[in-house]
Image (tube, rainbow, N blue to C red):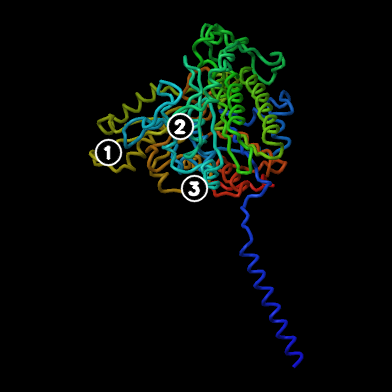
């Protein structure tokens, strides 16, 4: 009997303890997934037209607080590539932030032929919104042509829109597309005779006071100055001779040599477009980003914010002077100092170890083919006038009309399907015949058809890259690839856009909170960036993501 009483008492004790545990669990306050160790701010940096070898080629000239700090104290993905073509600014910025390629996010070029509108469209233009901060049309922009979300969108959604996203670039597309559909603000620079940071009514109806104050401060005008090298030019042995036949000229110049001090650089009242073609454009971008950091109170609480910065001047300078120029080298040495300014400000205002940075590029660039040719390296230029003449002769002879082709852009041919149907010929047959004709031309290396893109799944090589850039609804009927080191471009300056490795190989550096120190030579791809950041933050991937987190990066 005594044992029975002990047993009943024991059961009652267990029951009471269980009830007490359930009550405590019920009353226990839920804690968010995020911890106090989460980054207060993510800073995404895209350097426009940065080849990977700019990191290594100029390494000995960099200081300890810019590129080297990111690479040595962070994570360096040394074999990082775009997995699609065309490799240009609009698709590049979009792919970095969406974790997808143009086949999914729909930004297939800076400009492209819209089949439905029968007109060329610009990746960020939107006439349904008005300019803010200017009387011109330069602010009539939005991300409406981007079909998927971005990592910045996902962070805004995850934080119930409490986390801020601010995007900044000289180029409108360099701000609009990274900012995503939900950015608090995207700002870009209107040059010409205006010289102001502006935006679109998509984001706001008037500029914040701090932006107006910055525009009126005289800071922008201060960058209308001569461009001299930051170091003794004789130390720039990593670049070609200063005076050569492969570089463009500023107005009134007779040689493409330092110092660059033409009237349009020095005039204080007009032609602010010139700032974009000097390193001062990147310095101005840094100044404005630092102002945004402070005035928007980014990274000052436990709700993660996002600052997206694109450095556009490196692209303008590369196009004008070329990959091997001393101008490009000087631009990167000066950008190194701007990055140091940015990182030091983040240490002060957000706190060392409290923020995360990634740095990459939107595409690479080719060395000037005229220069390569002079070095006995196979290279050349496509004569589009001659090519179109030959193609029209073929069309007339084969089909009796040239009306089959509606547009040729981004190395794609768009056919008029109505004309093809009237000729009572299968579309795939016409695609193949034109592709074979183009392949017979001297400067062509490869051609593919839309039918091939539709029917096959490529996993490697040039076809894989082209397919990732081919959108079923928006892209063309025939795709063509020029021979390596062949471009359609003037004989001075560099360009990009191809699926070749010089256009796809770019840097990727991660640094700061949540990031391991180290490096990898395993292949990584541009769409891997957004899911890596999402995994680090513990948030959902962008809804079109095709990339995967880079496991070696995450702490």
- Where is residue 11, by image quadrant? bottom right
Q: Residues within 10 Å of mark 1 (few under 14, many from 20)?
A: some
The mark closer to the camera, 3 or 1, is 3
| Residue under the point 53% across and 11% down | 250
Q: Is there a contact, CB below 8 Å, between mark 1 and mark 2?
A: no
Q: Toward the viewer: 74 or 255?
A: 74
Residue identifier under label 3: 543
The mark closer to the camera, 1 or 2, is 2
Distance CA(mark 3)–CA(mark 1): 36 Å
Residue identifier under label 1: 420
Distance CA(mark 1)–CA(mark 2): 46 Å
Identify the disc placed on residue 204: 2
Q: Mark 3 or 1 closer to N-term?
A: 1
SS class of the residue under badge 1?
A: helix
Any part of residue 344 in sight: yes
Q: Toward the viewer: 113 or 194?
A: 194
Residue 401: % across, % down: 26, 30
| Residue under the point 61% across and 46% down | 537
Residue 2: % across, % down: 76, 91
Residue 487: % across, % down: 49, 25
| Side of 478 relative to 526 (left or right) | left
Q: Toward the viewer: 368 or 231?
A: 231
């Amino acid at each position: 009997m005594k044992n029975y009483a002990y047993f009943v008492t024991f059961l009652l004790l267990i029951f009471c303890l269980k009830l007490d545990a359930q009550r405590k669990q019920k009353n226990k306050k839920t804690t968010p997934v995020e911890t106090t160790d989460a980054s207060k701010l993510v800073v995404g940096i895209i350097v426009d037209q940065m080849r990977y070898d700019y990191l290594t080629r100029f390494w000995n000239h960099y200081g300890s607080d810019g590129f080297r700090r990111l690479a040595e104290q962070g994570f360096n993905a040394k074999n990082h590539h775009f997995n699609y073509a065309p490799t240009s600014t609009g698709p590049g910025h979009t792919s970095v932030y969406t974790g997808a390629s143009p086949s999914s996010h729909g930004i297939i070029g800076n400009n492209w032929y819209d089949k439905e509108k029968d007109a060329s469209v610009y990746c960020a233009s939107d006439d349904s919104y008005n300019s803010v901060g200017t009387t011109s049309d330069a602010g009539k922009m939005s991300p409406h042509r981007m079909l998927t979300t971005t990592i910045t969108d996902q962070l805004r959604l995850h934080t119930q829109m409490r986390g801020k996203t601010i995007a900044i670039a000289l180029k409108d597309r360099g701000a609009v597309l990274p900012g995503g559909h939900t950015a608090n603000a995207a700002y870009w620079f209107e040059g010409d005779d205006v010289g102001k940071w502006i935006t679109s009514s998509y984001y706001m109806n008037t500029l914040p006071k701090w932006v107006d104050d910055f525009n009126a401060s005289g800071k922008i005008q201060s960058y209308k100055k001569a461009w001299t090298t930051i170091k003794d030019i004789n130390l720039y042995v990593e670049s070609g001779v200063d005076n050569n036949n492969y570089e463009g000229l500023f107005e009134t110049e007779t040689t493409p040599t330092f110092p660059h001090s033409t009237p349009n650089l020095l005039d204080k009242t007009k032609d602010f477009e010139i700032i974009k073609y000097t390193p001062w454009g990147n310095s101005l971008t840094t100044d404005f980003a630092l102002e945004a950091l402070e005035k928007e109170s980014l990274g000052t609480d436990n709700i993660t914010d996002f600052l997206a910065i694109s450095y556009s001047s490196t692209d303008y300078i590369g196009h004008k002077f070329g990959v091997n120029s001393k101008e490009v080298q000087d631009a990167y040495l000066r950008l190194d100092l701007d990055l140091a300014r940015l990182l030091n400000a983040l240490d002060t205002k957000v706190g060392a170890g409290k923020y995360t940075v990634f740095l990459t590029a939107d595409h690479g660039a080719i060395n000037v083919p005229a220069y390569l040719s002079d070095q006995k390296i196979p290279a050349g230029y496509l004569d589009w006038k001659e090519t179109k003449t030959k193609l029209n002769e073929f069309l007339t002879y084969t089909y009796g009309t040239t009306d089959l082709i509606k547009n040729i852009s981004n190395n794609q041919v768009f056919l008029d399907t109505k004309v093809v149907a009237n000729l009572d010929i299968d579309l795939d047959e016409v695609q193949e015949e034109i592709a074979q004709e183009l392949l017979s031309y001297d400067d062509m290396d490869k051609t593919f058809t839309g039918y091939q893109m539709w029917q096959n799944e490529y996993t490697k090589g040039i076809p894989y890259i082209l397919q990732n850039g081919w959108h079923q609804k928006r892209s063309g009927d025939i795709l063509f690839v020029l021979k390596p080191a062949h471009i359609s471009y003037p004989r001075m300056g560099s360009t990009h856009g191809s699926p070749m490795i010089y256009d796809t190989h770019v840097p990727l550096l991660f640094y700061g909170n949540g990031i391991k120190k180290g490096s990898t030579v395993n292949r990584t791809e541009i769409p891997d960036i957004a899911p890596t950041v999402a995994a680090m933050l513990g948030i959902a991937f962008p809804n079109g993501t095709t990339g995967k987190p880079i496991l070696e990066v995450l702490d």
